[in-house]
Amino acid sequence: MNSIAIIGLRIISIYQIVTGTNAIAGMSIALPVVNTNFKEELSTLQLLSIAIPLLSGVVIWILSVPISRYVTNNQSTEVKLIDDASIVAAGTFLIGVYLVFSQLPMLFFVIEKYNELEYGMESTSITSAIKLSSINFTIGLLLMIGNGFFVKVYKWLRTAW
């Protein structure tokens, strides 16, 4: 079972690294044009929103084996048949990892933009973006932390029918 979780984590890792690389490439192309017009520096949170996908992808790749062992409760290295509960546990955890690490940069960026706005300006779209990002982030955390709960629900539903 570890192999499926490792492959899933590494696919998410590759996606995050490609997303971070695209953000850095886009910023390096657009920044000279923007800086000549606005003469404004990027804030720390904006730089973090660009660097987080790249860094999280590298960290997920490095920690994919220990994370997969944690998710599947498999401490041994022996190969065994994959049961459906392990697939549910790995799947919910991987969906949670994707939601958390795809929404984290957006959450940082939107919060930074919200802090830049002055009161009285049109901030309803930014507050709705903060709500959407934080909801997706929270759902991802719940899927990562509560994958055992989803396995219990799956087993209960399986035995109920």
Image (tube, rainbow, N blue to C red):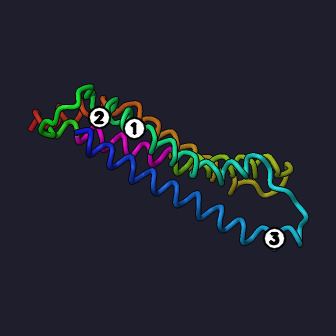
> What range of the chain is rendered magenta?
87-100
Label annotation for residue 32: 3
Task: Judge whether residue 26 can be spotted in this image.
Answer: yes
Answer with mark 1 or mark 2, whichever residue precedes in sequence: 1
Q: Quadrant of residue 147?
A: top left
How far apart marks 3 and 2 lie (CA) works out to 48 Å
Q: Is residue 95 magenta?
A: yes
**Quadrant position of the C terminus in the picture:** top left
Q: Is residue 85 magenta?
A: no
Rendered location of residue 73, percent (x, y): 27, 27
Is the stretch drawn in magenta largely helix, strand or loop?
Answer: helix
* Left or right of 12, for residue 36: right
**Number of residues whose C-alpha sits closer than 10 Å to that of mark 3, classed few (under 14), some (14–19) or many (20 or more):** few
Q: Nearer the viewer, residue 122 or 3?
A: 3
Farthest front residue in view: 77
Rendered location of residue 156, percent (x, y): 17, 31
How far apart marks 3 and 1 lie (CA) works out to 40 Å
Which amino acid type is marked by label 3? Pro
Mark 3 residue element: helix
**Number of residues whose C-alpha sits closer than 10 Å to that of mark 2, classed few (under 14), some (14–19) or many (20 or more):** some
Which amino acid type is marked by label 2? Phe
Mark 2 residue element: helix
Q: Which residue is mark 1?
A: 143
Q: Which residue is mark 2?
A: 150
Q: Quadrant of residue 26?
A: bottom right
Residue occupying the point 82% across, 50% down: 116
* Left or right of 62, for residue 70: left
Dots 1, 2 in contact, CB < 8 A: yes
**Number of residues whose C-alpha sits closer than 10 Å to that of mark 1, classed few (under 14), some (14–19) or many (20 or more):** many
Q: Is residue 73 above or below residue 15?
A: above
Residue occupying the point 36% across, 37% down: 65
Answer with mark 3 or mark 2, whichever residue precedes in sequence: 3
